[in-house]
Image (tube, grey):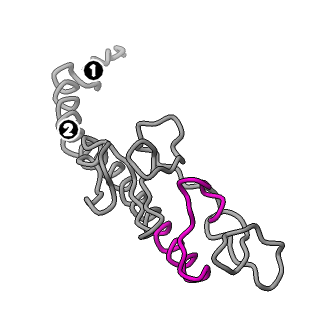
Amino acid sequence: MKARKSTKRGTGFTLVEIFVVAIIFGILAAIVIPPFASASETARGNRFASQLQTIRSQLELAQMQHAGAYPDLVNDGWGALTTVTEHDAAYSMGNRDKNDVGPYLQQPPMNPFADVADQTSVAADTSAAWHYNDVTGEIFAVVPQATVQGLNLSANDTVSP
């Protein structure tokens, strides 16, 4: 008996087939990745807009519980909203009795889009991370205009430095 020689041709892929598959993966990646990249920026903007809405609603609650007076965040910082205060117009520190209110916020809010060193700072102008008017209770995030365009924020939420 004569032994047969098996001359099975290679079962692997050719170089051309591998290149075709790589090109198809490249095209699919070019189509799929950009929407995901912009989705993270949109989510970041939405999260920030939600944070700003929370700050505004807590400012309104504080104003109602302190005889119509808004806290002076410009001079006193976020302490009037992050600590327990007495239920009057003074925003003085409370002693945790039944007349005390707050805290309205767990911690000072951070503006991650601000071009200042202290991203929790508050001022009456655009020199800080937050622009605040203690007479009207209006608060805005100070965000560079170029950043605002890339986020999903409205003009009512931000001011440009």
- The three-letter amino acid code for the residue at tag 1 is Gly
Q: Residue at x 48, y 64 (%)?
A: 134
Q: Is residue 155 left or right of residue 109?
A: left
Camera-nearest residue between 158 and 36: 158
Query: In the image, which disc is placed on residue 30?
Result: 2
Residue 5 horizontal/vertical position (percent): 32, 15
The majority secondary structure of the magenta stretch comes to helix
Q: Secondary structure at mark 2?
A: helix
Report the residue marked by disc 1.
Answer: 10
Q: Residue at x 78, y 71 (%)?
A: 94
From this view, report whether residue 1 is shown above or below residue 156: above
Q: Is residue 108 left or right of residue 15?
A: right
Camera-nearest residue between 124 and 114: 124
Query: In the image, which disc is placed on residue 119?
Result: none
- Residue extending farthest to the bottom is 98
Q: Quadrant of the C terminus?
A: top left
Which of pointers 2 and 1 indicates the residue nearer the eye?
2
Residues rendered magenta in the picture: 54-80
- Quadrant for residue 76, please give it: bottom right
Residue 127 horizontal/vertical position (percent): 42, 42
Q: Residue at x 24, y 39 (%)?
A: 29
- Quadrant for residue 1, please give it: top left
